[in-house]
Amino acid sequence: METKSIVRALAAIAHESRLEAYRYLVQAGPAGLPAGQLSEMLGIAPSSLSFHLKELVNAGLLSSRQEGRFVFYSAEYAVMNSLLAYLTDNCCGGNPCSPVKVDACVAVPKNHS
């Protein structure tokens, strides 16, 4: 992944609403979710959500597809994995990082507030 793409992706998810929407879409799997359902889940007005989703699509983190009168959004897992690979390249001082050796790395606590 090129540095400009990495910066664009990180900037896109550096907003509370976009990050939350992205996480829902990652959890939804390859089928994704229709925009209306995502709007309800997040409690965000459709027009505001549309703006946020456009930012994530422009960053390459999401894709959209039209099915009838619905627009479905889904995570681009290859882009997500490339971003994670870049962020964890040379992680942990060259020691393998895995769930078993998570104590070797600095763990970031999940914030569910």
Image (cartoon, rainbow, N blue to C red):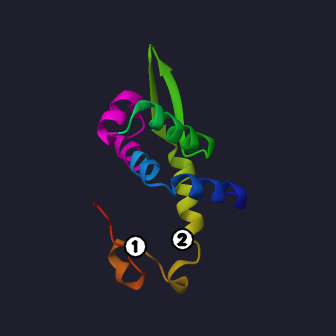
Q: Position of residue 55 (x, y in %)?
A: 57, 43
Mark 2 sits on what residue? 88
Q: Position of residue 6 (x, y in %)?
A: 64, 58
Tag in front: 1 or 2: 2
Q: Amino acid at mark 1?
A: Ser
On screen, 9 above or below 44? below
Circle 2: element type: helix
Picture quarter with the C terminus: bottom left
Residue, x 53% and y 37% (percent of image)?
51
Q: Nearer the viewer, residue 93 or 108?
A: 108
Magenta stretch: dominant secondary structure:
helix
Q: Horizontal placement of 59 versus 14: left or right?
A: right
Residue, x 35% and y 83% (percent of image)?
103
On screen, 69 above or below 16? above
Mark 1 sits on what residue? 98
Answer with mark 1 or mark 2, whichever residue precedes in sequence.
2
Q: Nearer the viewer, residue 2 or 13?
A: 13
Q: Amino acid at mark 2?
A: Thr
Q: Nearer the viewer, residue 65 or 7?
A: 7
Residue, x 59% and y 57% (percent of image)?
11
The part of the chain drawn in magenta is 23-43
Residue, x 55% and y 83% (percent of image)?
94
Graded by Cα atoms within 10 Å as few (under 14), some (14 to 19) or many (20 or more), the crowding at tag 2 reads few
Q: Position of residue 86 (x, y in %)?
A: 60, 65
